[in-house]
Image: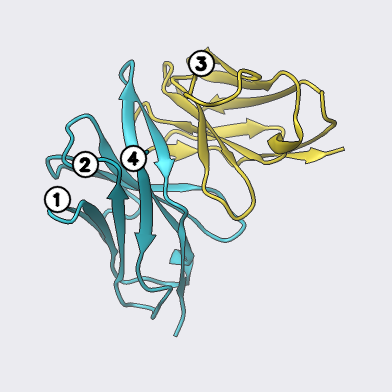
Chain colours: A yellow, B cyan
Amino acid sequence: DIQMTQSPSSVSASVGDRVTITCRASQRISSGLGWYQQKPGKAPELLIYAASSLQSGVPSRFSGSGSGTDFTLTISSLQPEDFATYYCQQANSFPWTFGQGTKVEIK
Amino acid sequence: QLQLQESGPGLVKPSETLSLTCTVSGGSISSNSYSWGWIRQPPGKDLEWIGNIFYNGRTHYNPSLKSRVTMSLDTSKNQFSLKLSFVTAADTAVYYCARVGETLLVEWLDPWGQGTLVTISS
């Protein structure tokens, strides 16, 4: 199985801050990566697919980059509604696997 | 707007079979543009992909669960289902269903159902 490792596991930030989350795959996955946001008690929501494509309806402050083994999710200016847990997920090969999550908390 | 809703027992006894249904509204599960997936999340833990089922019934299962998992489609009801046999406490989780789409040869999960908590306990 492909292991997905996110860092950091948590980050404290203020409204307006730029936040960067990284995700590393244990083997090359081309651009087969998605980013999901999950709020407490809610289902995950797709933010980014194919490593850098913004899902329809997602604010443009979210962006993704990377290919191969190293990927990044950036929130350019953190908003109050962005405090949540973020997961990366590889869809390059079965079984699909998720990272362990990064919790973005209020500073 | 496509919506998915999981349903099924919230409590299952150990060694029995967990059975869940996902009802899709606002779109057809028979579309060859999409497949359908199940994902679970134990309380306070990470997400685990269980498997996908394609419009033609072909499946991909997580090898860690493959011997116990069965997925199926009911196109007459626009539903797809999950069965997990011989459950233990380790199968206690929130179970989500989701649509699987594909763009640029890359698949993604969107939207998701709200999730349903299944507890394994006697």
Mark 3 nearby-residue class (10 Å; few <14, some 14–19, many ≥20): many
Query: Does residue A46 sit above or below B97 in this rendering?
Result: above
User: Residue A35 versus residue B5: which sits nearer the camera?
Assistant: B5
Write down the residue under mark 1.
B75
Q: Amino acid at mark 3?
A: Ser
The residue under label 4 is B99
- Have a look at marks 3 and 4 and say if they share a chain: no
Q: Quadrant of residue A74?
A: top right
Q: Of all residues shown, which one is farthest toward the bottom?
A: B122
Residue at figure coordinates x 30%, y 48% from the top left: B25
The image shows residue B42, relative to residue A38, as above or below, that is below
Q: Nearer the viewer, mark 2 or mark 3?
A: 2
Name the chain under label 2: B
Q: Categorize mark 1 by other alpha carbons within 10 Å: few (<14), some (14-19), many (20+).
A: few
Badge 2 or badge 1: first in the primary sequence = 2
Q: Quadrant of the C terminus of chain B?
A: bottom left
Identify the secondary structure beneath mark 3: loop
Residue that label 2 marks: B28
Q: Is label 2 in a helix, a strand or a loop?
A: loop
Dot 1: element:
loop
Q: Nearer the viewer, residue B61 or A17?
A: A17
- For the residues labelled 2 and 4, the Cα–Cα distance comes to 11 Å
Which amino acid type is marked by label 4? Arg
- Mark whose residue sits in front, 2 or 4: 2
| Residue B86 on image: x %, y % | 31, 72
Q: Label 4 near label 2: C-beta < 8 Å? A: no
